[in-house]
Image (cartoon, helix red, strand yellow):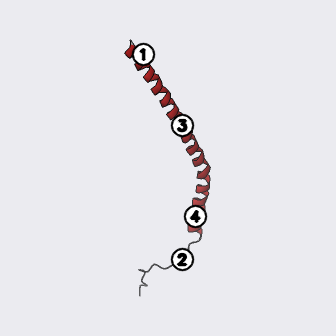
Amino acid sequence: MEVEQYRREREQEFQSKQQAAMGSQENLSAEVEQATRHQVPGMQKHILAQLLGLVCDGRPQVHPNYRIAA
């Protein structure tokens, strides 16, 4: 009976420690998700501007291997 009571006490202690650890992990996960949601739009704008710059600012050049057929 004493062993069973000791086991229950340890189980409750373990459950409380586990709950405390999981709670802090959930908070951290929420913070990371919020930061990600805040940063993604800025990154998308930057990437889009970079791609548009590469496409729209193209400079025509003759390829170095091009030979004029005579």
In the rendered structure, find residue 60 and report the number of the disc placed on it.
2
Label 1 residue SS: helix
Q: Nearer the viewer, residue 58 or 47?
A: 47
Instruction: Give the amino acid type for the residue marked by disc 1 in the picture.
Output: Gln
User: Comparing marks 4 and 1, which lies closer to the viewer?
Assistant: 1
Work out whether 62 lies above or below 40: below
- Distance between the Cα atoms at labels 3 and 1? 29 Å
Residue at the limit of the structure toward the front, as seen here: 2
Residue at image position (39%, 14%) is: 2
- Distance between the Cα atoms at labels 2 and 1? 83 Å
Which residue is disc 1 drawn over?
Answer: 5
Q: Quadrant of residue 56?
A: bottom right
Which of marks 2 and 3 precedes in the sequence? 3
Label 2 residue SS: loop
- Distance between the Cα atoms at labels 2 and 4? 19 Å
Instruction: Give the amino acid type for the residue marked by disc 2 in the picture.
Output: Pro
Q: Give x and y (percent) for residue 15.
A: 47, 26
Instruction: Give the amino acid type for the residue marked by disc 4 in the picture.
Output: Gln
Residue at image position (43%, 23%) is: 10
Which residue is disc 4 drawn over?
Answer: 50
Q: Nearer the viewer, residue 69 or 43?
A: 43
Residue at image position (59%, 67%) is: 53
Residue at image position (45%, 78%) is: 63
Q: Quadrant of residue 50?
A: bottom right
Work out whether 69 lies above or below 57: below
User: Comparing marks 3 and 1, which lies closer to the viewer?
Assistant: 1
> How many C-alpha atoms fall within 10 Å of the one at disc 4: few (<14), some, or many (≥20)?
few
In the rendered structure, find residue 24 and report the number of the disc placed on it.
3
Q: Horizontally, is 66 left or right of 26 in the view?
A: left
Q: Quadrant of the C terminus?
A: bottom left
> How many C-alpha atoms fall within 10 Å of the one at disc 3: few (<14), some, or many (≥20)?
few
